[in-house]
Image (cartoon, coloured by chain):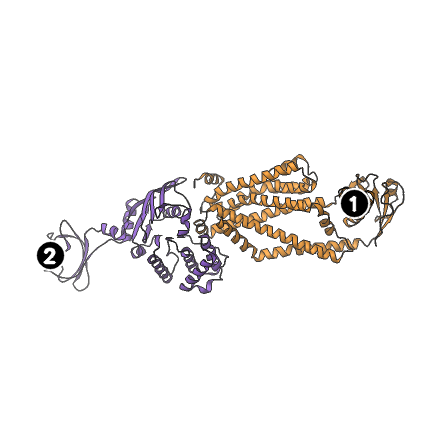
């Protein structure tokens, strides 16, 4: 869907993107992660053809990115904004027509969306008369009204209350199911784990990590487990097939262990060692969250 | 191209639908009508004094041919001009000196300034008489007829202790003035609208949505053209409504020939040429300046920050304007006036001052060519600054910064 090869973008005095390459597959929900100022917005602006890279190439469905692709991309910028004094219906139609829709088609689709999101009464209202959340909702509709193949959302959930954030999340998933590829940037790691198939982490103008969420999390597995048991407190003498990282005592002879399994041992060896001594209530592998991976990677190159 | 049309349409419609636009469009002709009513009232009351005009006719063509009106009586004393002037008894009496050769100017002497209405009355009567005489003399040869007609110009002089002083009357001066003032004001009004529109898009952050659909240059051009069309619409409505009011009022009180009516009447033959030039200089001047205004708008985060950039843009225009209305209109062919009308920064105002006074065609051609080249040049410069500026936030723009933006690659 989207291939980004060796993009370099420099602004006077600093490099915004340094040799960044990405691959977004068709039908994916792709998360573009990175701390503030990492270069996410610069990259998005290159994909949306607001700016051009100094070097490197972007391919859209195998074709070199060109103005004909504009109509197939929907973009929700991080800094939301609409014409304050313009009526909302008229404004949405205007924005859709700039993306190549006819007036009739835009009106028809807009009516469907307004009904879906409970916005029917807003048609004649001016943007400045709407609350911030309502404006955001309207802008989301404007982004997807022309049914783009690629939807780019910069921090889509910021500014929404939990109810509306959920609505928007559902809409994003539905659009994805209908075939749209979605690229979004965010700081909210829980939404990454929930939504994204793949991610790329950009930090200090460079891509430092990318891949599917599953692969990345698996690659950060380090044979760490948590175990809950009930019974007499075990005193470890060093002969056990694992290393104890943390021990906490709960109520009434309940204990929790955090362990790291070393060498060729497996979780089965751990169980075999423990079962004769106590009753195991839980064993779970600790897979680092995206949040932990994010922080770890960013701090590495601080 | 299609997208530029869409942008033009939006910029135009949102502005034309605004209450402020409708009010302005109606208010100006209403003020015009009010002014007209006051002038008519003043002129009317003045006309109730009796004027006796001594006609000293050296050409012999006009003797006994003037017809008296309610407050204007003509007499033919048959003395010399200087004698007639000495004989002027009342302040309200006048001497009309007609030279033997009509190519020389006809003069009107009085102890007070003559009213435009009175002068026009005499002028139109003379035109009628001359036309009649001409028709008799040469048959219906329209070219000749036109020549006779256009040769008669009244030069009104005031008799003061220091001698005779020409008093400015004539529609030319008024036209020259009006052209300069209108161009100057409207470039500011509509140029500022372009600038405000750019700032609005930048501060409301819709700019990023728009430029992900169209090129910044298309947006800038669409905005400039849209606002320009709003300006043209307003002018056309003003002219149409004002002309309508003038016609209606002038029609009702046809007995009182008002100065405004005279003014409009005098434009007559040259109106097309003058209006054409006005529109040309308004359009090119607007395009020239509004591109710069758009660049300024893109460089700032709010209107209060525009001052430092506005000053150098507005200075040449202000300078030309002040010079035009205070000095240039008296010497429209002076080297200064000619040069100013060739420089695109000052040409729209300076040339409008000169237009009523027969500008040589080659000068007009150079000036117009320079204007077109000028606005293409400013649009190019502005678009390079604009494309970078609209996406820059929180950075205090300096001139150095603007130069840097200009040289940015895409």
Question: Which numbered disc covers residue B140?
Answer: 1
Question: Where in the figure is residue B143, as x and y percent of width and height?
Answer: 75, 42
Is A10 rendered above or below residue A84?
A: above
Task: Locate residue B334, reporting x and y percent.
Answer: 68, 35
| A292 relative to A254, above or below | above
Where is residue A139? Give x, y as percent.
43, 57
Q: Which residue is mark 2?
A: A273
* Quadrant of residue B284 within the rendered picture: top right
Q: CA distance from mark 2 to mark 1?
A: 130 Å
**A231 or B223: which is nearer to us?**
B223
Specify the chain shown as orange.
B
Give the farthest residue toward the top: B335
Q: Residues within 10 Å of mark 2 (few under 14, many from 20)?
A: some
Q: Residues within 10 Å of mark 1 (few under 14, many from 20)?
A: few
Q: Is residue B368 left or right of residue A209?
A: right
Q: Colour of chain A?
A: purple
Name the one closer to the observer, B205 or A141.
Answer: A141
Q: Nearer the viewer, mark 2 or mark 1?
A: 1
**What chain does mark 2 sit on?**
A
Circles 2, 1 touching at the beta carbon (< 8 Å) = no
The front one of A190 and B369 is B369
Any part of residue A204 in sight: no
């Amino acid at each position: 869907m989207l291939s980004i090869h060796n993009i370099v973008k420099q602004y006077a005095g600093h490099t915004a993107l340094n040799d960044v390459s990405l691959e977004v597959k068709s039908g994916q929900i792709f998360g573009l992660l990175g701390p503030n100022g990492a270069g996410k917005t610069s990259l998005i602006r290159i994909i949306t053809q607001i700016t051009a890279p100094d070097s490197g190439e972007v391919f859209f469905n195998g074709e070199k990115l060109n103005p004909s692709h504009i109509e197939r991309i929907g973009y929700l910028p991080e800094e939301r904004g609409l014409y304050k004094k313009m009526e909302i219906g008229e404004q949405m139609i205007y924005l859709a027509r700039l993306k190549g829709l006819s007036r009739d088609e835009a009106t028809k689709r807009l009516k469907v969306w307004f009904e879906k999101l409970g916005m029917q009464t807003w048609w004649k209202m001016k943007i400045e008369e709407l609350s911030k959340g309502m404006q955001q909702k309207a802008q989301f509709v404007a982004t997807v009204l022309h049914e783009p193949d690629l939807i780019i959302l910069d921090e889509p959930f910021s500014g929404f209350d939990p109810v509306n954030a959920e609505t928007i999340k559902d809409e994003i998933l539905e659009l994805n199911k209908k075939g749209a590829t979605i690229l979004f940037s965010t700081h909210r790691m829980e939404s990454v784990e929930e939504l994204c198939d793949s991610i790329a982490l950009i930090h200090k103008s460079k891509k430092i990590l990318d891949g599917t969420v599953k692969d990345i999390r698996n690659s950060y597995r380090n044979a760490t487990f948590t175990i809950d048991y009930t019974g007499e407190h075990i005193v470890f003498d060093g002969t056990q097939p694992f290393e104890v990282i943390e021990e906490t005592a709960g109520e009434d002879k309940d204990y929790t262990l955090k362990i790291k399994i070393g060498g060729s041992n497996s979780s089965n060896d751990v169980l075999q060692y423990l079962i004769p001594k106590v009753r195991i209530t839980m064993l779970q592998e600790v897979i680092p969250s995206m949040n932990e991976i994010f922080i770890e990677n960013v701090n590495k190159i601080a | 191209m299609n997208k530029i049309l869409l942008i033009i349409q939006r910029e135009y419609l949102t502005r034309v639908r605004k209450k402020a636009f409708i009010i302005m469009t109606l208010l100006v002709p209403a003020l015009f009508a009010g002014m007209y009513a006051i002038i008519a009232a003043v002129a009317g009351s003045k006309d109730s004094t009796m004027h006796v005009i001594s006609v000293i006719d050296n050409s012999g063509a006009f003797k006994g041919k003037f017809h008296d009106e309610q407050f204007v009586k003509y007499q033919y004393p048959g003395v010399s001009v200087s004698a007639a002037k000495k004989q002027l008894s009342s302040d309200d009496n006048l001497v009309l000196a007609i030279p033997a050769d009509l190519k020389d100017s006809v003069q009107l002497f009085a102890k007070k300034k003559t009213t435009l209405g009175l002068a026009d009355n005499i002028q139109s009567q003379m035109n009628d008489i001359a036309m009649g005489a001409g028709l008799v003399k040469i048959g219906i040869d329209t070219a000749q007829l036109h020549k006779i007609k256009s040769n008669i110009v009244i030069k009104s002089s005031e008799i003061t202790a220091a001698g005779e002083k020409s008093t400015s009357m004539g529609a030319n001066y008024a036209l020259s003035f009006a052209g300069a003032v209108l161009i100057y004001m409207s470039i500011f009004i509509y140029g500022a609208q372009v600038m405000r529109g750019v700032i609005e898009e930048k501060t409301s952050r819709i700019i990023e949505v728009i430029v992900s659909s169209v090129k910044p240059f298309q947006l800038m051009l669409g905005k400039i053209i849209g606002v320009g069309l709003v300006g043209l619409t307003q002018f056309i409505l003003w002219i149409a409504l004002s002309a309508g009011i003038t016609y209606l009022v002038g029609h009702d009180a046809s007995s009182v020939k008002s100065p405004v009516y005279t003014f409009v009447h005098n434009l007559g033959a040259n109106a097309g040429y003058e209006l054409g030039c006005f529109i040309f200089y308004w359009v090119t001047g607007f395009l020239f300046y509004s591109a710069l205004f758009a660049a300024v708008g893109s460089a700032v985060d709010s209107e209060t920050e525009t001052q430092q950039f506005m000053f150098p843009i507005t200075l040449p225009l202000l300078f030309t304007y002040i010079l035009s209305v205070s000095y240039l209109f008296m010497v429209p062919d002076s080297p200064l006036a000619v040069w100013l009308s060739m420089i695109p920064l000052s040409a729209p105002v300076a040339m409008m001052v000169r237009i009523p006074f027969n500008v040589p065609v080659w000068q007009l051609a150079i000036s117009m060519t320079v204007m077109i080249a000028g606005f293409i040049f400013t649009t190019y410069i502005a678009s390079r600054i604009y494309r970078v500026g609209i996406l820059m936030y929180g950075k205090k723009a300096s001139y150095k910064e603007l130069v840097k933006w200009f040289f940015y690659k895409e």
